[in-house]
């Protein structure tokens, strides 16, 4: 198996507070890696470090390395705009643009220079299909994205991320604002898109992690406690702390 994205001794601090501490982790190409752990353990900070989203606050200090296809994305000449194209992000709450369904998906390709209408039509249709949304919205592409349900909006955000041809999709608790039916659709979609993309998902839902992921990393107080196949983590945890967390003794 090839490694798509890797962290080496990665630490992130906000002022005097170290949110994550010396995490070294390899995330395999075309696999789903789940990041689990109690609230405040550094899960979101960790995945935001993978495409330098923590820098947007202006207060994060990052040390160590994040390698995307073997190249450190924190190198001084690394193109951050290209990084965020290659490593897309899906947030807890759906955040469609206040534009049409069509324009949401076409936005990224337009920014990156695609202007031909037939090309945009193809990209929009192709990625709405990948996001399992085409059948529901194909007859109303000019309608506002804000009219969609929460689950549809989240799938639209996934289609928007896929439209710029990323290598990695980061998902920060993508189902936490959704009902069980919408959650099931997103989980099915995660498994499907991992055939083409590397997926890293933060989730507080143990059942979700066990259903959708190939590998699981357990974080606690900013440290990586255990990492392995999801089956091994959930059925044969090596750390007592991991076992207590996944059996619900704390968290």
Image (cartoon, rainbow, N blue to C red):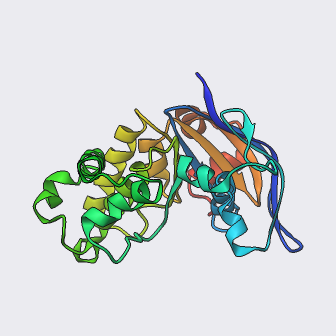
Tell me, yes or no, if residue 21 can be seen here: no
**Total numbered circles:** 0
Q: Is residue 196 above or below residue 203?
A: above
Counting from the top left corner in percent of width and height, residue 12 is at: 80, 60
User: Residue shown at 70%/36% (left/top)?
Assistant: 238
The reply, left or right, for residue 216 in relation to residue 147 is right
The reply, left or right, for residue 24 in relation to residue 207 is right
Q: Is residue 123 above or below residue 238?
A: below
Q: Quadrant of the N terminus?
A: top right
Furthest toward the right, the residue is 16
Q: Is residue 146 above or below residue 60?
A: below
Q: Quadrant of residue 38?
A: bottom right
User: Residue shown at 14%/57% (left/top)?
Assistant: 138
User: Residue shown at 47%/67% (left/top)?
Assistant: 92
The reply, left or right, for residue 119 in relation to residue 51 is left
User: Camera-side residue: 6 or 246?
Assistant: 6
Furthest toward the left, the residue is 139
Q: Quadrant of the C terminus?
A: bottom right
User: Residue shown at 16%/60% (left/top)?
Assistant: 137
Tell me, yes or no, if residue 24 can be seen here: yes
Counting from the top left corner in percent of width and height, residue 121 is at: 23, 51
Q: Quadrant of residue 107?
A: bottom left
Counting from the top left corner in percent of width and height, residue 236 is at: 60, 33
Furthest toward the front, the residue is 116
């Amino acid at each position: 198996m090839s490694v798509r994205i890797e962290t080496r001794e990665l630490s992130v601090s906000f002022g005097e507070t170290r949110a994550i501490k010396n995490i070294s982790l390899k995330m395999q190409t075309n696999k789903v890696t789940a990041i689990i752990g109690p609230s405040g353990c550094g899960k979101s900070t960790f995945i935001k470090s993978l495409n330098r989203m923590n820098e947007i606050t202006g207060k994060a200090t990052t040390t160590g390395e994040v390698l995307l296809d073997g190249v450190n994305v924190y190198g001084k000449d690394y193109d951050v705009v290209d990084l965020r194209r290659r490593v897309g992000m899906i947030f807890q709450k759906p955040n469609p643009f206040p534009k049409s369904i069509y324009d949401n998906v076409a936005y990224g390709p337009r920014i990156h220079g695609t202007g031909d209408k037939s090309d945009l039509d193809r990209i929009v249709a192709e990625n709405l299909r990948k996001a399992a949304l085409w059948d529901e919205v194909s007859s109303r592409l000019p309608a506002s994205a804000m009219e969609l349900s929460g689950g549809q909006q989240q799938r639209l955000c996934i289609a928007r991320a896929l439209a710029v041809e990323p290598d990695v999709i980061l998902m920060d608790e993508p189902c936490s604002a959704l009902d069980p039916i919408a959650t099931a659709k997103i989980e099915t979609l995660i498994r499907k898109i991992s055939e083409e993309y590397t997926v890293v998902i933060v989730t507080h839902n143990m059942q979700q992690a066990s259903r959708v992921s190939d590998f699981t990393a357990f974080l606690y107080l900013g440290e990586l406690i255990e990492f392995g196949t999801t089956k091994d983590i959930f059925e044969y945890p090596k750390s007592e702390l991991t076992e207590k967390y996944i059996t619900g003794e704390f968290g």
